[in-house]
Each structure stands twice: as C-alpha cells, then as structure tokens.
Amino acid sequence: MKIIDRYIVREVLLPFLIALLVFTFILIIPFLIQYAEAFIAKGVATLIVLKAMATLLPQALALSIPAALLVGLLMAFGRLSADREFVAMQACGVSVTRLLWPVGLISLAGWAATSYVMLEALPDANQAFREIAYSVVASRAEGEVKPRAFFQEFPDLVLYVREIPPAGGWNDVFIADNRPGQTPAIYVVRHGRVVLDSTKRTVELVLDDGTRHVANPDGTYQVFKFEHQVLSVNPDTVFPRTGPQRGDPEMTIAELKQRAADIEKTGQPSYNEVMAIHKKFSIPVACLVFGIIGLAIGATNRRDGKLGSFVYGLGVIFAYYIPLNLAPALAKAHWTSAAFAVWLPDILLAILGVALFRWRARAADQEFRLTLPAFLRRRAHGDEVAQAPRAAAMHSHRDTGGGWLLRPRILDWYVASTYARVFLLCVVGLLALFYISTFIDLTEKLARGAATWGMIGAYFWYLLPQYSYYTLPMAVLLGSLVTVGVLTKNSELIVMKACGISLYRIALPIIGAALLTGSVLFALEQTTLGPSNEKADRLRTIMNGSSLQAFDLFTRQWIVGSRGQIYHYNYFDPQSNSLMGLSIFEFSDGMKTLVERSYADHAVFHPEAGHPDQWDAYGAWIRELLPSGDTRRFATREKADFQLEQPSYFATRRPEPQYMSYSQLRDYINQLKTSGFDVIDQQVALERKVSFPFVTLIMTLIAVPFAVTTGRHGAMYGVGVGIVLAISYWVAFSVFAALGAGGAMTPLMAAAYLLLTVRT
C-alpha cells in the first residue's frame, strides 16, 4: 500500500469504529434493559449474563457494520474536504479513481466481516441466546412469580404471593387449585417454593404450614391443615418437549433450503426462506455499494465536514434498509420474485453510486448539494434580510463600549446553535436506527399476515416516547462531543480562553441544554411514556399472536383489594357496574389465615348515604372461619350488602411501574407500605424515574473534558473515549438498578450511584 492508501485507511478507521460502537450499542440498549437487568435481578451468574449479551452482538452488527462503514467514509472524506486536503490531493494528481483502491480495500473488509456475521455468527448466536434465555427461565421458574401479582402460567393453578424473601421461596401464598379430576380447592400457605428437575422432567410446588379449603357441591365445607404438602404441575409448561425452535435468522443456508423444499412440497410458496437465504449475501454486498457512494459524496470541497456527511449518510441508510424490508410485500404481491426483491436495494443504490462516482470524476471537487425548493429558499433569504439590521445594531452597540455585556450572549448563541444542529441530527439519526431495526423485526409478521401496515404505523407512533427516552441522552453526549471537539479543532476554544472565558462558561449553554433535555425526559415519564408503552405492548402482543387477557380489563378475574382481600369474578360489566360470579377471600395478619369467604352470583354497585362502597349481592352466601379453620357462621341470602371497592377499581389494570408516572408510582408505593407489603422493586423503579433524567447532565460532564484534547485527531479520540465512558455508565446504571431490585443495595444508591461519583 502507498502512503496515501494507508493515510486514507487510517482516516476512515477511527470514525468507522466510533460509528460502529454507537450504532451497535443503540441497537442493544432495548435488549440490555429487557434481558440483562432481569437476569441480574434473578441472581443469574455474571458469566451467563455476559455470555447472553455477547450473543446479541451479531444481530446488531449485521445492521451496524454497513451503516458504520458508510458513515465512517463520509466523515473521513468530510474531514479531508473541510481541511482542503482533498483539494491538495487533486493538485498533486491524485484522482477520485485512484482513491477507489483504499476505499475498495475498506469496503471488502466490511463485506467480509458482514458476511461472516450473516453466514456464521448470527445463526449460532441467535440460537445460543434463545437457549440461554430458555434455560434461565426453566431453572428460575420460581423467580417468575412476582410479589402481589397473580401468576397463572401453571395450568389450572393461580398463585398469589405476598412477599418473596431474598433467601428464595415465597411467603404468605394463596393458591386456587382447579386441576381437572379434583374438587376445586383454596390453599393458604405460610411458605412455599417450586422444585424443578430437568432430568426427570418434574415440577412440584412444595408448600409448608398451610390449610386447604374445599367447598363441596353438597354444601359442606372442609378445612385440612398440613405441615408439608406437594402439588404436581404439568412439566410441559416449564420444560417443553423440544427446546427453542430455530427461526429463519437462526438457520444455516442448507437448513433454509431444506425448509423451503419442504414448504414447496405442500404447494405453498417459500417466500420467507428464499429471502432469508439471499439476505445473507445481499446485506454484505451493501458494504461495497456504500463504499462507492461514500467516496462519491464525501470527496468534495464543502466546509461542513463531518456534520454534513452525517446527514447524507442517514439518507443513504434509509434509502437502503427501508426498501430492503419492503421486499416481502413486493414478493407476496407477485410484483417480483423473492430473490430479486431482496437484491433490489443493492441494485438501485449501485446504479446511483456508479452515476455519482462518474459525476464526481468529471466534476472534480464540486460540492454535492441537495437544493431546497424555491419557496423555502425565498423564505430563508427573507429571514436573513430581516435579521441584518439587528446584527448591525448589535455590532454598533459593541463598538460603543457595551460589548462586554453582549459578548457572552453572542458566544452562547454561537455555541448553542452549533450544539442544536448536531443534537437534532443525532436524535433523528438514532431514532432512524431504532425504527429500522424494529421494522426489520416486524417484517416477518407483516409477511405472514400477523400485522398490517396500520398496526405497524400505530406501533411506531406509540414507541416514539420510549425511543426518544433512549436516544435523547446519546444525542446529548454526541452533541456535546462534536460541539466542543469542533471548537477545539478550529482553535476557537483557545481564542475564547485567551479572552478570559473559562471552559465552564463556554460549556454553560451545553449544560443548560442538558438540563432542559433532562426535564423533557422527566416530563415523558410523568405524562406519555407509560400509556404509550402500554399501548405498544398491547399491539406487540396482538402481532405476536398471543392472548390479550393480560391487557383486557374485563377478563382479569383476579384482583387484590385495598385491604388485602382477594376478589375473583367471571366478568365485570362497566356499563352496569356489575360483577358476575364474585368470590371474596378475606385474611387476618396479612395472609396467615383465611377468616371469611363470600360468594355472589351477581353483584351491582348501589351506593347509599354513609356507604359509598356498597354493592347489592344476589344469590349470596357468607362463611366466617375461626383461626382453627372451623366454621364460625354460615349464612345464605337472596340479597346481601357487600362492602367492596369502587367500580373504577375493577376497571383499572394492576399498576405496573413501567406504565406509571412518577407521582402514580409514588402514591402506589405509599398504599403498599400502609398494607405492610415489601416495596423494594417499586422503590427502585421510583428512584430510577428520578435519577435517569440526570443522565443528560452526566453525559455532558463526561463529554466536555474528553472532547477538549490536543493533537491532529484530538476531537475524534475525545469522541471515542467519551462514548466508551458513556456506554460504561449506561451498563453500570442497568447493573446497579438490577442489584437494587435484587436487594443488594438500597434503591436510592442503586439509582444514583454514578451521579454521585462522576468527575468533571
């Protein structure tokens, strides 16, 4: 390689690695929060957690390598163009065609890396992750039972656990046993646990110190006390007879071909399998196409440098991945073959890349520009004319001696405007990555008819608050790094310091923007984030083909009252405020003994003066029990007065921290505390809602000192180091939150540890 070739490769390598790091981490964030925190909170070994997260890397790299290659090329050539080095190369006789050699080597390396990921790493890694998650769930079934939540995954059994001690097992357990072939029974148990044996395929609930209540059809009522009892559970619910099945991404080419052949034998088209095979080759080829486009667009004389390159890079990424994921719809509509539909984005962008390259070879260093419509250009020109007198007045005022007042304001506007451009670009770009990766995940559901375009559009809309919640901190980080890095590289920071302006004063607009963004994050938590997540989860459940019972208010059937009593009903009618098939279980001393059991065929809300919670119960009976379990009193009535909750209580879903605002969760915690419940999980979630918005301030405090570096590549190295630290912060934030949920540290310390230890 010539010196010029090595120079180009070095220039591309650093921005490529930084872009790869950012894109990969952004794509892994949802999995990190969804799986890693859950594994850590359940006490899964650290090595297993790290292995599970490592298996997620190939899935992200399949998307991030081509995108990072394009952005790396554009940023490298953008820097060369901004510093006039590209003009110097042309003056020395180095043509655009000559630069194809180093760019081609880089693109071939990207193609080889992506091919390895698609053909070798991705199938094995995806399957390995599914197997790890499967084994964790199977071995930690006890941890799947959440405190104060009804667990109905075991067939014909309903579990309600009041507390889960750190040592394991369950305290104060309520079990409704409706297994076929047995009389329905209610268990009230002081302590219980689950015992699994994967070798023998047995699942048993071990119950200690409890009572079994049976209401016989003949009207008799029996109570059995026991010190130790075991309930057998159908093992197929925990240990399916086959492990996690391989989907198309987890299959090799040979397996995909075999599946396609099997499907075609049945007379059905094998669109998905054919496209999965060709995607393993077409996505790596995108690296070669992006190489040509990156050289053609990046090698110019424009002065916007990396910032403008980032904009063009996002446009090309959109132009590739969106048509790629529309391929199933084209093939299903018989507009083209499945194979051609997958290769179509490569073909179209290759034609565009060749045309741009030929134009670049003829146009030398002319700028590649996308022209605004005429009416927008006229409006922008009008704004400039309108602002000219104001600028002149400011300049005149500065000359008369008042400049010492205006100079900091002008500086603030300059820093803030630079920061705002980068920040908005990062928000748009990172949101685009999230949506592209989500769309890739949904294309299979769209192809098989499990989702419609309307459902996907609504799903994307409901995901916007959550994705904004993820992207705003990273946008703050990148905006701070790029802004301060540009000021450093252009020696503007040195001039400002020479004028007596400290780094803290220069960074004041950036810190202000970080605090404002943190306020936006808290506002999202307080308003739209929870409801939007709930609606998105509901749509996701529909598209996955799962039951909506978990989201359906009217089929919830089991609910805990404000005094700790348990309600069971067959149906709730919000129009008439009535409950059908209502059973009420009331306890003493938490859930140590069952003291009263009531039933009504039909109950209607009928408040009266002094009794705002009164319901008229028809076809009712009431049985009061002694601590020994014997019946103290039993009465049947055609109509009885029940003091229950308000109808709105039955029409409200069980509170979940991820669906609640800060104030709602705080009030819910206070309610649980007054009832004597353990609220450690809820407290961690509450403190997290408060501490996470401060992540924007921490990102800024991390970014500014590392962007202020020296040397020819100081800004880029500062960006790289800052991003590594930010990723470390985010990982540590998730780990400490999981440790807090697991009881290893206090909720406040778990949520705020790094805020208290960050250095400036």
Image: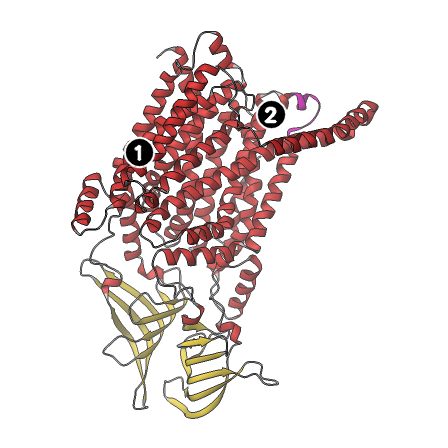
Indicate the quadrant where residue 254 lies. top left
Q: Residue at x 68, y 21 (%)?
A: 498
2 and 1 marks in contact (CB < 8 Å)? no
Q: Residue at x 18, y 48 (%)?
A: 264
The answer to if 504 sits in the magenta stretch is: yes
Question: From what the image shows, is residue 490 above or below residue 28?
Answer: above
In the displayed orientation, state which residue is furthest to the right. 400
94 left or right, relative to 695: left
Q: Which residue is at the front of the view, 115 or 672?
A: 115
Res 487 label: 2
Q: Residue at x 32, y 90 (%)?
A: 220
Amino acid found under the numbered disc labelled 2: Leu
Q: Locate the N terminus and report the quarter of the image it occupies.
A: top left
Q: Residue at x 53, y 48 (%)?
A: 692
Question: From what the image shows, is residue 218 above or below residue 434?
Answer: below
The crowding category of the residue bearing disc 2, from other C-alpha atoms within 10 Å (few below 14, some 14 to 19, many at least 20), is: some
In the displayed orientation, state which residue is furthest to the front. 335
- Under tag 1, what secondary structure? helix
Q: Which residue is at the front of the view, 224 or 637?
A: 637
Amino acid found under the numbered disc labelled 1: Ser
Q: Tell me where residue 145 appears, x and y as whole percent.
A: 36, 63
Tally the marks: 2
Q: Tell me where residue 647 appears, x and y as whole percent.
A: 52, 75
Residue behind mark 1: 282
Indicate the quadrant where residue 284 lies. top left
Res 216 label: none
Q: Earlier in the sequence, mark 2 or mark 1?
A: 1
Give the magenta range: 495-505
